Image (spheres, helix red, strand yellow):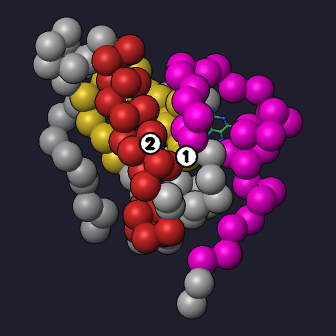
Amino acid sequence: MPYSYDDQNIFAKILRGEIPNKTVLETEHSLAFEDINPQAPQHVLVIPKGHYVTYDHFAAEATDAEIVDYTRAIGAVCRKLGVTLEDGTGYRLLTNAGPDGHQEVPHLHIHVFAGGFLGRMIKVPG
Ligand code: 5GP
């Protein structure tokens, strides 16, 4: 079944400027902003400006220009936060998809967590 995109999701509203955000970085095809409910000392969300629901959706349908821009934007955020291994002590990238991934906002976003030791990767419930 093809992906359908809900343009009333909160990140679509942020992209349209209907809801404020604390922008970390903006490029032609991507926007990075602080998470409203940080789960680490530094917690930034990086989203493509295009209407993609999940990572696999983006990987399948985004243009090469969008993919290059988004990939580089995520790296640029890490550099801007000072957490690359050149400048700092690392970070974690994570993206959730669908109900099993506990995705709350149906617009692709990659979480950048940093600012301190983040512990082991994930805790599986049950
Ligand atoms: P998900 O669970 O979908 O992977 O993550 C959604 C993220 O979006 C959560 O970390 C949540 O705190 C963040 N979020 C939800 N609404 C807003 C908002 O209005 N502004 C910002 N900056 N972040 C939001």
Magenta span dominant secondary structure: loop
Q: Is residue 102 shown to the viewer in this render?
A: no
Q: Residue at x 77, y 26 (%)?
A: 20
> Where does the C terminus fall, quadrant-wise?
bottom left
- Whether residue 9 sits left or right of residue 99 in the image: it is right
Is the CB of the residue bearing disc 2 within 8 angstroms of ligand 1? Answer: no
**Does residue 12 lie above or below 85 as drawn?**
below
Is the CB of the residue bearing disc 1 within 8 angstroms of ligand 1? Answer: no
Say what amino acid the circle numbered 1 marks: Pro
The circle on residue 70 is 2
The residues bearing labels 1 and 2 have C-alpha atoms spaced at a distance of 6 Å
Circle 1: element type: strand
> Where does the N terminus fall, quadrant-wise?
bottom right
User: Which quarter of the figure has residue 125?
Assistant: bottom left
Q: How many marks?
A: 2
Residue 70 falls within the magenta-colored stretch: no
**Residue closest to the far right:** 18
Say what amino acid the circle numbered 2 marks: Tyr
Disc 1 to disc 2: CB gap under 8 Å: yes
Residue 29 falls within the magenta-colored stretch: yes
Q: Nearer the viewer, residue 57 or 33?
A: 57
Q: Residue at x 57, y 41 (%)?
A: 29
Circle 2: element type: helix
- Whether residue 43 sits left or right of residue 85 in the image: it is right
Crowding near pointer 1: few (<14 within 10 Å), some, many (20+)? Answer: many
Q: Nearer the viewer, residue 70 or 44?
A: 70
The range drawn in magenta is: 3-30
Q: Residue at x 73, y 54 (%)?
A: 9
Q: Position of residue 77 (x, y in %)?
A: 40, 24
Q: Position of residue 110 (x, y in %)?
A: 43, 45
Q: Which residue is mark 1?
A: 48
Q: Position of residue 65 (x, y in %)?
A: 47, 48
